[in-house]
Image (cartoon, grey):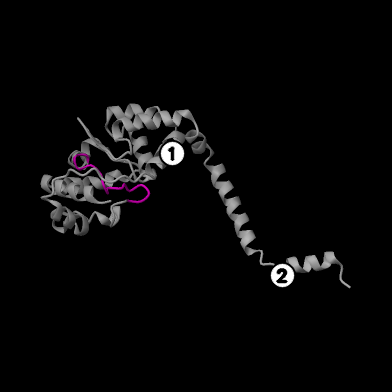
């Protein structure tokens, strides 16, 4: 007669352990992620993070939806984290011209930059609107088809059909109309030449080849995307 211990061992072998092993693997993977992001997690748990976040809200809006004030403040909500990090480095390295943001960025360490970028990425308020609607049809056509005669590629090819971008390519969806107009019309002066991880230089020919009315049309259209 088999012992109770032997029977128990046989029963255990008959049990499908795959769900248990999967759960354990997820726990281990989660531990690795948490360990790898220790700096960011520590920053988010600190009072310093909340203080910096409140400072950002002063200009960019309570939900980072952007703000239409004396200067148009860009929407950060839903923005690609890698893009935000790249642009903050561009301010620090003086590759992007903005005295206020240069001072702000210089006060941020890499972990704080990553924590803020991740936080803004997960926000999703509605666009604040307010763009003129007369050029929406032209803006949509440029976004979807480009302007081959002017050597302007379709915007969606890089920024996505929904305008949400990816990795270092920025989200345009819901961006303030006035901000987009200002950036595109002043690209050569404001954005510098970029780096291997900051692809802003790619936009220089496109910005140069768009007329003012075409810039306004595209800016109006992307401001309506969600």
177 falls in the magenta region: yes
- Residue 144 at least partly seen: yes
Does the magenta segment cover residue 5?
Answer: no
Give the residue drawn at x 41%, y 37%: 116
Q: What residue occupies the far bottom of the structure in this picture?
A: 1
Label 2: element kind: helix
Residue 210 placement (x, y as % from top left)? 15, 48
Q: Residues within 10 Å of mark 2 (few under 14, many from 20)?
A: few
Q: Element type at marker 1?
A: helix
What secondary structure predominates along the stretch shown in magenta? loop
Number of callouts: 2
Q: Report the disc number at residue 114.
A: 1
At 18% from the left and 47% from the top, the residue drawn is: 220
Looking at the image, is 124 positioned above or below residue 7? above
- Residue 28 bears which disc, if any? none
- In the rendered image of this protein, does residue 214 appear above or below residue 178? below
Which quadrant of the rendered structure holds the N terminus?
bottom right
Mark sitting on residue 14:
2
Q: Is residue 103 above or below residue 213?
A: above
Q: Residue 129 appears at what percent x and percent y?
A: 21, 44
In this picture, is 100 found above or below 13?
A: above
Quadrant position of residue 72: top left
Q: Please tell me which of labels 2 and 1 falls first in the chain.
A: 2
Residue 187 is drawn in which quadrant?
top left
Measure the alpha-carbon separation of dots 2 and 1: 47 Å
**Which segment did they paint magenta?**
165-179
Q: Residue at x 24, y 54 (%)?
A: 155
Relative image position of residue 140 (x, y in whole percent):
18, 55
x and y percentages locating residue 150 in the rendered image: 14, 54
């Amino acid at each position: 007669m088999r012992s109770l211990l032997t029977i128990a061992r046989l029963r255990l072998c008959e049990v499908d352990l795959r769900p248990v092993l999967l759960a354990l693997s997820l726990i281990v993977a989660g531990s690795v992620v948490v360990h790898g992001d220790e700096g960011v997690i520590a920053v988010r748990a600190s009072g310093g993070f909340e203080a910096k976040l409140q400072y950002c809200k002063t200009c960019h809006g309570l939900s980072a939806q952007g703000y239409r004030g004396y200067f148009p403040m860009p929407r950060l909500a839903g923005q690609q984290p890698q893009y935000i990090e790249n642009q903050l480095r561009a301010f620090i390295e003086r590759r992007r011209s903005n005295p206020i943001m240069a001072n702000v960025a210089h006060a941020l360490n890499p972990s704080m930059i990553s924590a803020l970028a991740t936080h803004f990425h997960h926000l999703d308020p509605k666009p604040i609107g307010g763009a003129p609607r007369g050029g929406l049809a032209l803006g949509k056509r440029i976004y979807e088809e480009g302007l081959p005669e002017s050597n302007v590629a379709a915007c969606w090819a890089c920024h996505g059909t929904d305008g949400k971008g990816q990795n270092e390519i920025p989200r345009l969806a819901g961006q303030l109309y006035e901000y987009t107009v200002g950036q595109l019309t002043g690209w050569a002066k404001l954005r510098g030449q970029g780096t291997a991880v900051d692809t802003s230089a790619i936009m220089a020919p496109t910005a140069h080849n768009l007329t003012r009315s075409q810039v306004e049309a595209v800016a109006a259209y992307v401001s309506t995307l969600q």
